[in-house]
Amino acid sequence: MHPRSFALLFLFLTVLRLAGQTGLPVITTPMEDRALARDSGPVTIDLRNHFGLSGVTGTVVQFTTVLGTFNVEMLATAAPVSVSNFLSYVNDGSYQNTIFHRSAKLSGTGNGIIQGGANTYALPPGNVATKSPIALEYNLPNARGTLAMARTSAADSATSQWFFNVNDNSTVLGAANGGGYAVFGRVLGTGLTVVDAIAALPIYNIGSGFTEIPLRNIVAGQTAVQLQNFVAITKVATVPILPTAGVTGSVLDFGNGSTNSNPEVVTATIAANELILTPKAGATGVTIITLVAGDAQGNAVTARFRVGIAATGAVALPPVAQSPAIGGNATFGVTVAGGASAYQWLRNGTLITGATGSTHTVTNVQSADAGLYSVIATTPGGTVTSVPAILAPVTTQKVVGTAYELNPNVLHPNGNRYDQLLLTGSAATFTADAGQVTRISYIDLNDDIVQVEFSGAGAVTLVLDAAGGPAAPVNYSQAVNYMKGHGSIYLADTNSTSYVSAFTVGRMTAYDPTGGYNIALPVSDTNRPANNGNAIFKAGTSYDGVADIGLLAITSPNSAFGGILSANAHYWRDKGYTGIYAPGVLISDGRVFLHDLTAFGEASPSLQVGSASNMRITGGNLKQDNNRAVQVSGFTSLLFANGTDSHGNLLSAQANQGRLEENGVDVTAQRVAGGPP
């Protein structure tokens, strides 16, 4: 038994609505990309210049309670005497290890307050030593979330006690109530969740003046108050907004989510409110620094910026991917270590007339603007070309650009539903409805009908080079006019639900209304694509049976994609990049399938992703017409497997004839695998 017991008289319990508050974390000045010289010294960034709290200019006091931590801004302009008085108690440590001794409803069922500053956390509770009373400063209403001085019926009687307004008490505690009650602070961010949690506790009359005390963890049959039943305030202290050397506590910290994507290039250390960037000896490259500043309630803001390290005359910060809405603008920029005297921007390896600055802006972006943008910079040592950045526009509409929805909600024999789009010009951007596939069709340069299918989150842009039409298909009996050209596919705003496939219309991939071949069943001796009786196929016609694609590029805000299923596609181009270009993108289900990849002329072959566990070439050999190395990333093994064309003809697995390079290093022997699929 404790020295003194208190009888428990249950009063009532209420749950109160949370209102929005100011004082949330904000980025005050964006973090800018930085280019540092190779082997240069540390660079220090003062984070106080970049992070803060919205609308907060006064001193911040942090309350640490048994139910959570929250922050309060002092309103010294409106109540200077009250603020000074309160802070004198804070600085003396008077409120450390005290309790909330009162939770009251001033009008019977509403107008709640929770009150503290009177009693210590002890059994029985002691009293906080008080100082001389102060004059009443009633200048602000007792709105929800404000902090006010408690007093007796005498106007100038406030000492150590204070209360939080759980409801809007502007009227009941206004001037008509003995001159009002002095508001001198306000709860910041979503700290009212803690205040509300305290106000929602059961209220008891335990005698000895504690007639409206909130208590916690009362168990059935309990007849005496235990120390742990009190709502303890363990600490009340002034804190800076950001961590500060020599000061315990802060409103924001950088503990959770702050990362450095490439510590082999730059080390990043946070010391109090400073970020220290130190280039690694001899290292070059680019890293992405992510800083997450959060408060005690989990409210946070995120700032990301790049740090590039390069030797003089090399690109330190290449252009970054852009995914503007159709009709928006996209700006690319480049930073060359030591500077450059001239610039020339390119799209898909073709010079852009007039694009000769260190930045290039594409205004009023349309589907046809999608592509890979790079820049050639002239330096005293010669010219240097950046790696390309993706421009892939987005839309919330089903389709924009030169295409339309031909047939919606078509039921496929496999049970899926798809929306059929038809391209009528050189480019279109489209999306997929939830739970459905969107298909768009065109004719490739070998006169095969190509189907591009997409499902999941994001937007897809199809762009045809050397576009012609619309015209009737040469190799098919169909009363539909198609555009013809060499298609490239650009995807943006994707996530792990996003899938894309590309294939041609053949006897294995087409529905057979005669029943000779069932597309929904596996190919077998009794279910042969050769028996497909669909009248779309012309007798005696020789079909290429493989889709010709220029490039498939992906940019994703969360670096995720489901899978790339293009085992029936041959990627090729004669300039710019060709193949699959999705640097940093995690392929969630692991599958990246393609038939083959060939670079002609000045093209650069690419198989670049962030991560893929099942990368395979189906019936191809990666032999490059221009003898260039295939630039690779994101996979440890490349399988050369059997494939088929779209008519079911076997394309046997071939031996690798390409050279694979990653960051300038030949990794062919480490990446190439073989054998059956």
Image: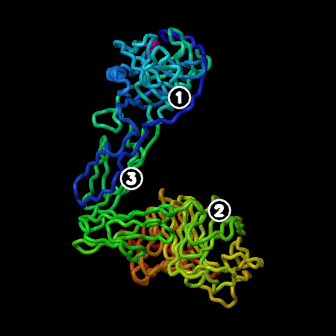
* Magenta residues, start to end: 120-125
- Quadrant of res 65: top left
The residue type indicated by label 1 comes to: Ala
Vertical side of 456 occupied by 450: above or below:
below
Q: Earlier in the sequence, mark 1 or mark 2?
A: 1
Mark 2 surroundings: few (<14), some (14-19) or many (≥20) residues within 10 A: some
Q: Earlier in the sequence, mark 2 or mark 3?
A: 3
- Quadrant of res 546: bottom right
The residue type indicated by label 3 comes to: Arg
Vertical side of 40 occupied by 90: above or below:
above
Q: In the picture, which quadrant includes the C terminus?
A: bottom right
Return the x and y of residue 567 as percentages of the image width and height. 56, 74
Mark 1 surroundings: few (<14), some (14-19) or many (≥20) residues within 10 A: some
Q: Extreme front residue here? A: 176
Distance CA(mark 2)–CA(mark 3): 34 Å
Return the x and y of residue 308 as percentages of the image width and height. 31, 60
- Disc number for residue 304: 3
Secondary structure beneath dot 1 equals: helix
Vertical side of 6 occupied by 579: above or below:
below
Q: Which residue is mark 2?
A: 436
Return the x and y of residue 481 as percentages of the image width and height. 64, 80
320 displayed left or right of 209: left
